[in-house]
Amino acid sequence: MGFLMSKSMEQSMKKQQEFMLLNGRLQLERQILMQNQMRERQVAMQIAWSREFLKYYGSFFGLAAFGLSVGAMKRKSPGLFVPIIPLSFILAYQLDTAYGTLLQRMKSEAEDIMVTEHERLELPHGTPTFEAIEKARRAQSAFFLENSLPGETIQ
């Protein structure tokens, strides 16, 4: 009788472990998907910001180029065209960010760095471990416990 209960408990325990493993995997997959969606939203916001900025900067550039051109022709001074050169570089950069391939080129360069220059990506003191995080958490908890007001309870 005891052997049958033991076997039944082992099967139940094995099913529970499989369930926990599957549940952990599902949770991890959901977390990865959520983080990716958040990253995509942030990138979309950056692109939208670049496009909005381009509207204002494009208007400024057009007015500045027009004003400098008129001033250069009236005064017969070609030196007034000089500010258009750096302004046009900024405009080209903003156009490339908003509508061009800058993000794809940056992604490609980042992938290359991750493959060929991986040592540059390492964190000081390496990747944080559970033990290091737990040690810091305990130290912080001890600090708050020591510095709490008399009669105050920390939950």
Image: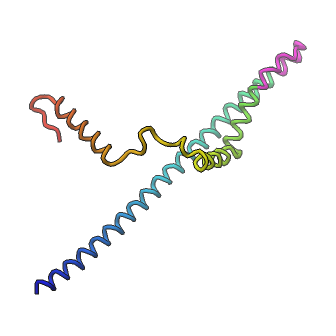
Give the quarter of the figure containing the N terminus: bottom left
Q: Which of the 4 quarters of the picture holds residue 85?
A: top right
User: Which residue is at a point 67% across and 42% down the rendered structure image?
Assistant: 98
Question: Which secondary structure type mostly characterizes the magenta part of the structure?
Answer: helix
Image position, residue 39 (x, y; %): 51, 49
Which region of the structure is painted magenta?
68-85
Using residue 76 as the reference point, say whether residue 120 is left or right of it: left
Rendered position, 68 above or below 89? above
Question: Is residue 69 or residue 138 the one in the foreground?
Answer: 138
| Residue 52 falls left or right of residue 149 | right
Tell me what residue is drawn at x 67 percent, y 36 percent: 54
Compared with 34, 73 (above or below) is: above
Residue shown at 38% from the left, 45% from the top: 128
**Residue 120 occupies which quadrant of the picture?**
top right
Percent x, y of residue 146: 17, 31
Q: Is residue 10 above or below residue 112?
A: below
